Amino acid sequence: MKLEFDRKPIENMLDCRIMNLRTYQNLLTLVYAIEKVNQNPHLLPNTSLGFQVVDPCYSESKALVGMFNILSGSNNQIVNYRYEHIPDIIGFLDGMSSKISIMLAKMFGFYNIPQISYSSMDSLLSDNVQFPSFYRTVPNEYIQFQAIGKLIRYFGWSWIGLFVPDTESGLKASQRIQKELEQSDACLAFLEFLPYRTAIDESKTKAIVNKINSTSATVIIAYGDKDYMLTLQIKLYQFRLPEKIWIISSQWEVSSEFDYEFLNFLPFNGSLAFVLHANDMPGLSEFIQNVQAQRYPNDIFIELAWNELFECEHGFMKSRKFCTGNETIGLSSFKHIYEEISFYSYNLYNAVYALAYALHGIQSHNTMEWIENSNLRSWMIHKYLRKISFTNNVGEVVQFDEHGDGQSTLDILNWIVLPNETQYAVKIGQFVPNSFNQLLINETLIKWRPPYNQTPISTCSDTCLPGYRKSLKETYSSCCYECVPCSDGEISNDTNVDKCSKCPLTEWPNEEKVACVPKVLIYLSYEEPLGICLLLVSVVLFLLTCLITMTFIKYRDTPVVKANNRDLSYILLLFLKMSFLCPLLFIGLPNNVTCLLRQAVFGITFSMAVSSILAKTILVLAAFHATRPGSKLNNWIKSRWPNCIVLLCTMFQVIICGIWLGKSPPFPYYNMDDDIERILAECKEGSFGLYCVLGYMGFLAIASFIIAFLARNLPDIFNEAKFITFSMLVFCSVWISFIPAYLSSKGKYVVAVEIFAILTSSAGLLGLIFIPKCYIILIRSDLNVIKHFKRNNY
């Protein structure tokens, strides 16, 4: 049985006579594939395939005419009429632009004739409802969208220009590419729709040129069929444009345009191009090399090809020379026509075999229908074509998915154009569409165009270094931003971060804001100058008080020491020494013991000291009135009542401190609120208890001051009323000033303020009460006699 598509192997029913050597390679691949099928005894045995070729002249209207010619078997193009002697068409292979493929797919879908494309990747063709009879040995272009997104992400480009055709497919492609760019954190610098080359005008040309000239994007994607991209290529040839890195889609086979001598490829030097994976088919190169005109007398394209290759013509046509008929392509200088098998030829080869295996399935399962050739219809092939799966001659599996799409990897080429406009391509990577969508790149093989000596950068804004974050500019794309330093307490240890990270509470950013380091623990220590100074002052004043005490003990029997109750003076000196030692509880890292003791010890000590002064003040006033005849105060002065006053007043302060420590005892506290950069080591004391202690101490001081003020003019050189008045005035002034200073200070300075108040007020009491007496004892001993005492009516 002999199944033929046409008795004449190669016939051009439209005869446009437009020849491209790459296209001629595809034609020879078709012939070779059919011959290999016919020579295979295990594939379609006792059956041979024929074919018919139509040149659509890259025109939709002529492609439509050619389709009706095939369907009717006549140039009359009568719809739904076919000459009886013309066998039915059972399959159609196309490799034209997606625009023509879509138009043909709509028409062939009406007749249920399988259409297998070996080049059209348009996603619209995957719609089984609109195109139920369409198949292709190439994948859906969605795979290419994913590959572009992966490539953009791999090189870190974020500011991209995009050219697409001004068609419905171009619009969908632009939307899908934008989606992939968003997932790669990239944005479009511009989007320009390219018209078909016959529809371009001057205004559109200026728009294209202005986009390329004005954009700051280094990388531009050119996506679409070569018919549309040729528009862009012509514009790049006419104008001097800045150097850009182009990403070229697989639909635009740049190598196929190399035969156009008027085109300039220098703008595409260093560009990256996606191409469908291809492989050398065994025997194909040898077949193409040995093609002769006499072997294919019906091949009307061979005349154009031979004229291009050998500058000769056949038959009656006038030319510079006639062909001998013995020429072979292997003898020509255009070796790339057979040495480099394009992915179009590879996928066309697979398409022929896919149709052959589908027919073989019918032959195997429907022997009777196959024997009666008249019953074989094209719609029968779909059942077997949808589930076709075979391994071609190079060991690669060919099959269609549920949408009729083929499965294929994408090779990534680096186009290199030399100054003499010689072009060549280097395979630098591959995109494998699987569950992981692997992108494999060998950067060492890439040769970028000058002036880029390394991987170019294409961003709208400069890279934000660690320690900074991106701040989007208003009315700009999300890829256009300013770099602002991280806020206090935040860091960024990576480039181009959208948000800085907060440090833990116990850590703070370093100076560069790239890492969190432990916060410095702040407290008044013995090692720092302030702590050392306060400690030295405290020790000096303590030693001075000890000297005064020793002086008073040594001269305890002198009138100055005995005057105004010697015991009260000893008590006062004792507690002044203790007050000078109180700062030792405040300096250093707070702990449970120091926090519990320091305010209580300070409060009780000062209360004892101020109570002693209060008792001395009352004693001065009582001593003056006791000199009157018949006064009962003389016995009171000589009794223990002054000491009882001291004890009673101190006990009341002890009770206050006991209640405070019992209900809410102070404890060590690490304050991270008042100073965000450091940790303040404090004692959490609570304000109420402390204010009660200070308030009671202030009450005693004010009482002493009032009584001393009333007795300031009493006679007697040894009268202490004036000195007590001045000492209480200093004491009260210090502690009144202490309150706002205490409330406005933080950290170690709170402690320093309190220590300063303790030392200053204690030094005031010591200096104003005891220094004048020491002056009389040590320097003016002539005044420290009983006669002088009596002479002043004491």
Image (cartoon, rainbow, N blue to C red):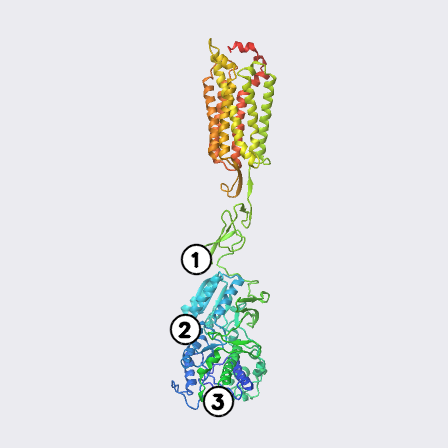
Tell me the CA gap for discs 1 and 2.
32 Å
Q: Earlier in the sequence, mark 1 or mark 2?
A: 2
The picture places residue 672, in percent across and down from the top left corner, at 51, 42
Q: Secondary structure at mark 2?
A: loop
Looking at this view, is 349 or 624 the one in front?
624
Q: Is residue 243 visible?
A: no
Res. 476 mark: 1
The picture places residue 734, in percent across and down from the top left corner, at 49, 28
Res. 371 mark: 3
> Mark 3 and 1 residues: CB-CB less than 8 Å, in contact?
no
As drawn, which residue projects farthest toward the bottom?
A: 85
Q: Secondary structure at mark 3?
A: helix
Residue tagged by mark 2? 199
Q: Nearer the viewer, mark 1 or mark 2?
A: 1
Which three-letter amino acid code belongs to the residue tagged 3?
Answer: Ile
Taking 375 as reference, is 738 above or below it? above
Which three-letter amino acid code belongs to the residue tagged 1?
Answer: Tyr
Q: Earlier in the sequence, mark 3 or mark 1?
A: 3
Which three-letter amino acid code belongs to the residue tagged 2?
Answer: Ala
The picture places residue 74, in percent across and down from the top left corner, at 42, 88
